[in-house]
Amino acid sequence: MKQGTDHGMAERKNALGQPIGEELAGWSARPRPPRTPMEGRLCRLEAFDAKRHADDLFTAYRIDTEGRNWTYLAYGPFETLEAFTAFAEKTYTGEDPHFHVIVDKKTGKAVGVASYLRIDPACGVVEVGHIHFSPLMQGKPIATEAMYLMMARVFDELGYRRYEWKCDALNAPSQAAARRLGFTFEGVFRQATIYKGRNRDTAWYSILDSEWPALRQAFEAWLDPENFDAGGQQRRRLADLRPKT
């Protein structure tokens, strides 16, 4: 794991002369993420409803004919709508993981999901995961906006201190996405878990509340319609809009 931060870890000492972490005066447990929708310009994130979302999601996921997007998930792919719906009704409606469906506001169709998980209100820590973007949103501004909306809820609305991203250390696209979105790499937990009968070393990333204001500004500048030309191509990359470290 990453060693040392800029939080004064070596500056404070207790009565025994031992270094201790910064005092969090006034800290209190944070609320759990609510079920209320998150509205953006391109998408809306809302609670799963099988009647409204299951067919859309199954159809969107089937565009990935190779099943490539299921490789690093612990479940799937599903061959029938009935099997997917049964899975979704069980998995997408729990409290932790706490799923949201991503609806494309242009088409009104559900095009992906993402969840909050390992929710720790007492410490103000939450992870984003179970991210499954269909080909209808992969590599498009709607995907970035969905992640921005989930971050904004965690930091601005709920006041959490830490937002985590974890993935299979062999999942290069996921690690690239985490870095692009401003997460900081913290290390790899070796043999962290088993899924689909195989080992997983887990790469850990995080964003802290102190880092969020600058990231928020970068996201909002990138998502501004003026940042895209008539063909929908970005004028400036998200990485170029973030503070240099």
Image (spheres, grey):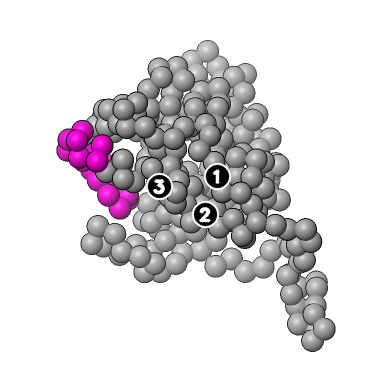
Q: Which of these two is toward me, 141 or 37?
A: 37
Camera-side mark, 2 or 3 = 3
* Helix, strand or loop at mark 3: loop
Of labels 2 and 3, earlier in sequence is: 3
> Does the CB distance between marks 1 and 2 fall below 8 Å?
yes
Residue at the disc numbered 2: 119
Asked if residue 238 lies left or right of residue 61, the reply is right
Residue type at mark 2: give it: Ile
Instruction: Look at the numbered disc 2 and give the secondary structure of its residue.
Output: strand
Q: Which of the two discs, 3 and 1, labels the residue nearer the N terminus?
A: 1
User: Would residue 178 appear left or right of 30 to someone viewing this image?
Assistant: left
> Which disc, if any, is residue 218?
none
Q: Is residue 139 visible?
A: no
What residue does disc 3 label?
94
Neighbours of disc 2 within 10 Å: few (<14), some (14-19), many (20+) = many
Residue 74 is one of the magenta-drawn residues: yes
Rendering quarter of residue 197 = bottom left
Q: Callout 1: 10 Å neighbours few (<14), some, many (20+)?
A: some
Q: Mark 3 is on which residue type?
A: Gly
Res. 33 mark = 1
Label 3 Cα crowd, 10 Å radius (few <14 / some 14-19 / many 20+): few
Q: Residue at x 59, y 27 (%)?
A: 223
Estimate the x, y position of residue 108 in percent, counting from the top left: 41, 19
In this view, the residue farthest toward the top is: 230
User: Where does the magenta region start and end?
Assistant: 66-86
Asked if 37 appears above or below 10 in the picture, the reply is above
User: Could you say where residue 187 lies in the image, as x and y percent from the top left?
Assistant: 51, 63
- Labels 2 & 3 near each other (Cβ < 8 A): no
Q: Is residue 112 above or below residue 90?
A: above
Q: Earlier in the sequence, mark 1 or mark 2?
A: 1
Q: Label 3 vs label 1: CA separation?
A: 12 Å
Left/right placement of residue 44 relative to residue 84 reads right
